[in-house]
Image (cartoon, rainbow, N blue to C red):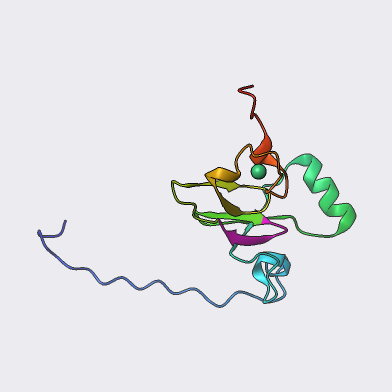
């Protein structure tokens, strides 16, 4: 159809979205986004649609990029621990390996003292 190395210039034009459209009333489409990074519309299921109709609200899911975790609809960068440290997921902090199994709960959730007896 076109000769090799033919360059095509395509332009797609779409009218601006209608602010009154029900799709534009979704929390992910507004100016005051509920998520810090990525907001996606939750897939509809019969159960969710029933909740939607009763609450007259739109459902959404917040997502985070790699190396971040979701906490209360906000993405927080995970702490980067060195090989001499271990990661506490409950507090997103790093502690030196000497703190592991030393009888003191250094992590907020105390996971540094879990499985210390070779369990
Ligand atoms: Ca400890």
Farthest right residue in view: 54
Q: As displayed, is residue 110 above or below residue 117?
A: below
- Quadrant for ligand 1 reads top right
Asked whether 51 or 67 is in front, the reply is 67
Q: Is residue 74 magenta?
A: yes
Query: Residue 4: x percent and y percent?
Result: 10, 58
Q: In the picture, which quadrant includes the C terminus?
A: top right
**Residue 51 falls left or right of residue 83:** right
Query: Residue 112: x percent and y percent?
Result: 64, 41
Query: Residue 22: x percent and y percent?
Result: 73, 66
**Residue 81 falls left or right of residue 108:** left
**Residue 16 falls left or right of residue 33:** left
**Residue at (78%, 45%) from the top-left corner?**
48
Query: Residue 1: x percent and y percent?
Result: 16, 56
Asked whether 52 or 64 is in front, the reply is 64
Residue range corresponding to the magenta coloring: 71-78
Q: Is residue 5 magenta?
A: no
**Residue at (81%, 60%) from the top-left corner?**
57
Q: As displayed, is residue 13 above or below residue 97?
A: below
Asked whether 16 or 81 is in front, the reply is 81
Which quarter of the figure has residue 23?
A: bottom right
Q: Main secondary structure of the magenta part?
A: strand
């Amino acid at each position: 159809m076109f000769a090799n190395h033919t360059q095509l210039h395509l332009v797609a034009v779409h009218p601006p979205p209608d602010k009154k459209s029900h799709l534009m009333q979704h929390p992910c489409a507004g100016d005051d986004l509920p998520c810090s990074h990525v907001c996606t519309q939750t897939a509809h299921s019969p159960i969710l649609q029933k909740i939607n109709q009763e609450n007259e609200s739109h459902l959404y899911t917040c997502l985070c990029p790699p190396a971040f975790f979701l906490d209360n609809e906000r993405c927080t960068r995970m702490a980067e621990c060195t090989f001499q440290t271990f990661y506490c997921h409950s507090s997103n902090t790093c502690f030196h390996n000497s703190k592991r199994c030393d009888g003191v709960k250094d992590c907020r959730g105390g996971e540094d003292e879990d499985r210390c007896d070779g369990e």
